[in-house]
Amino acid sequence: MSRKGNRDDNAVSESFFATLKTELGERFEAIEVFDNGTRRRSAIGHQSPSAFERRAAG
């Protein structure tokens, strides 16, 4: 994780994820969409982002 005031801390992880996206292509996108849409988050009341957005919209 990045420390305050150190812009280079995140460079290694950004490079890793860029390589991962390039090599896995569509498979990575499917994992990212599934995980980000269905995994529950404590910051939004232990619900998935999809459920949270549906609730906020309706």
Image (cartoon, rainbow, N blue to C red):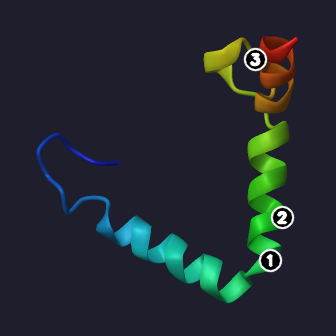
6 w.r.t. 39: above or below: below
- Residue 57, picture quadrant: top right
| Crowding near the residue tagged with mark 1, few <14, some 14–19, many ≥20 C-alpha atoms within 10 Å | few
Horizontal side of residue 14 vs 39, given as left or right? left
Three-letter code, disc 3: His
Mark 2 is surrounded, within 10 Å at the Cα level, by few (under 14), some (14 to 19) or many (20 or more) other residues, namely few
How many marks the image carries: the answer is 3
Query: Does 48 appear above or below 3?
Result: above
Residue at image mark 3: 46
Residue type, label 2 = Ala
Q: Gap between marks 3 and 1, in whole Å?
A: 28 Å
Residue drawn at point x = 41 percent, y = 76 percent: 15
Choose top left, top right, bottom left or bottom right for residue 23. Answer: bottom right
Q: In front here: 11 or 58? A: 58
Q: Earlier in the sequence, mark 3 or mark 1?
A: 1
Whether tag 1 and tag 2 are in contact, CB under 8 A, the answer is: yes
Instruction: Work out whether 45 lies above or below 52.
Output: above
> Residue 26's mark?
1
Image position, residue 26 (x, y; %): 80, 77
Tell me: residue 3, above or below residue 18: above
Which secondary structure, mark 2? helix
Query: Residue drawn 42% across and 66% down?
Result: 13
Disc 3 to disc 2, C-alpha distance:
22 Å
- Residue depicted at x 82% and y 75%: 27
The mark lying in front, picked from 3 and 2, is 2
| Rendered location of residue 10, percent (x, y) | 32, 60
The residue nearer to you, when weighing 50 against 45, is 50
